Amino acid sequence: MKWGRKDNIFFKPHQHTRSLVMVGLSNHMTLYVPRWLQALKKISCLFLLLFSTVVANAATLEEGNAYLQKGDLDKAIDQYEEVVKEGYIGFELFFNLGTAYTLKGETSKAIFNFEKALRIKPMHRITQQQLIQLNLKLPDKPSIYEDTGLLAFIKKVQFSLSIDAWAFLSIFFMLLVPLVIFVSYKKPHLKLRKLVFMTSILWFFMSGFSVLMARNCYHYKYLHAEAVIFDESIKVFDQPDPNSTILFNLHQGTKVEITDSTANMYYIQYSEKKGWVVNQDVQKIEL
């Protein structure tokens, strides 16, 4: 195969020429770089950028922890909030930020961050206790109760594994179903064959149960709509209109459940009370 020359650029004809890129080095020299190599270079740069961001966030988080241990709450909060703005999500971050706001006496912000920490670790006992103590200080005095009996057991099982772990189990159990059915047909005895076949039904239900647990965990972590009031006092209306009738007032630090929304208002529920609030009056809890 011969080399050619065109417009001071050397080239080599090839049936896969389209997959190559020429990079000029001088007036009479070129280097052929495969497209896959250029793509790999871009991916590597992206990976290095993400890695450097993670390292920087970790360093900032450690600085915040050091300030918190020294009792310098303002600097600790500044460091933690900087990491939050970068989009970092972590239990330690939200728990320590909630602790800093608690020590500073900013109850609503402390509740807000402890609630976010609880989204990541719903069964973390210390976080639950912190929220109970903070809620006792609120003007609205929200009802505090703990799940008991069967409901508590189901909740404990549900949050015993992560979303990814439940999803993996569902796939694993589902793959067991055809495998067990295949094995059952290989058994010589009819009773043993039926017994093995019946276990495939168990694995099928276990797969469905795992899917349900993964769905519930995902809903609680990302879709369960709640908000915390940051203003000293807000008005709750009977219609999605700030000029409608005022039903009652809610105060700073109170957590409400969001059940509906419009462009500018949320329909919220607090205990047995319901109504509309301006969405700027509350801070939505989301990861």
Image (spheres, rainbow, N blue to C red):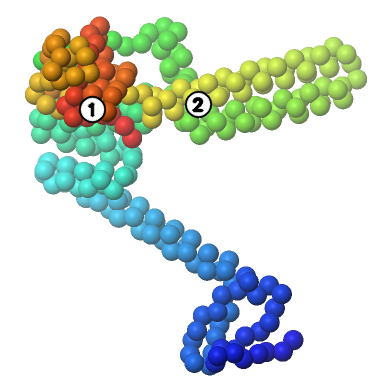
Residue 52, image x, y percentages? 35, 58
For the residues bearing labels 1 and 2, Cβ distance under 8 angstroms: no
User: Which quarter of the figure has residue 88?
Assistant: top left
Q: Which residue is mark 1?
A: 264
Where residue 236 appears, as percent x and y from the top left, is 16, 15
Q: In the rendered image, which quarter contains the C terminus? A: top left
Quarter of the image with the N terminus is bottom right
Is residue 132 visible from the viewing direction of this image? no
Question: Which numbered disc, 1 or 2, marks the residue closer to the eye?
Answer: 1
Which of the 4 image quadrants contains residue 170?
top right
> Relative to residue 258, is residue 217 drawn left or right?
right
- Relative horizontal placement of residue 234, taking residue 154 as reference (left or right): left
Name the amino acid type tagged 2.
Answer: Ala
Which of 261 and 121 lies nearest the eye of the viewer? Answer: 261
Residue 63 is tagged as none
Q: Is residue 48 left or right of residue 67?
A: right
Q: From the viewer's side, name the closer residue of 40 and 59.
A: 40
| Mark 1 to mark 2 CA distance (whole Å) | 32 Å
Q: Work out whether residue 58 can be spotted.
A: yes
Amino acid type, callout 1: Asn
Callout 1 crowding tier (Cα within 10 Å): few <14, some 14–19, many ≥20: few
At x 49%, y 67%, the residue is 41
For residue 151, side relative to residue 77 (left or right): right
Residue 95 position by quadrant? top left
- Tag 2 residue: 214
Residue 78 screen position, x and y as percent: 16, 46
Q: Residue at x 82, y 22 (%)?
A: 184
Classify 273 as above or below 23: above
The relative height of residue 87 versus residue 129 in the rendered view (above or below) is below
Sequence-first disc among 1 and 2: 2
Where is residue 253 drawn, in percent x and y? 16, 23
Q: Considering only vertical position in the picture, is 278 above or below 26?
A: above
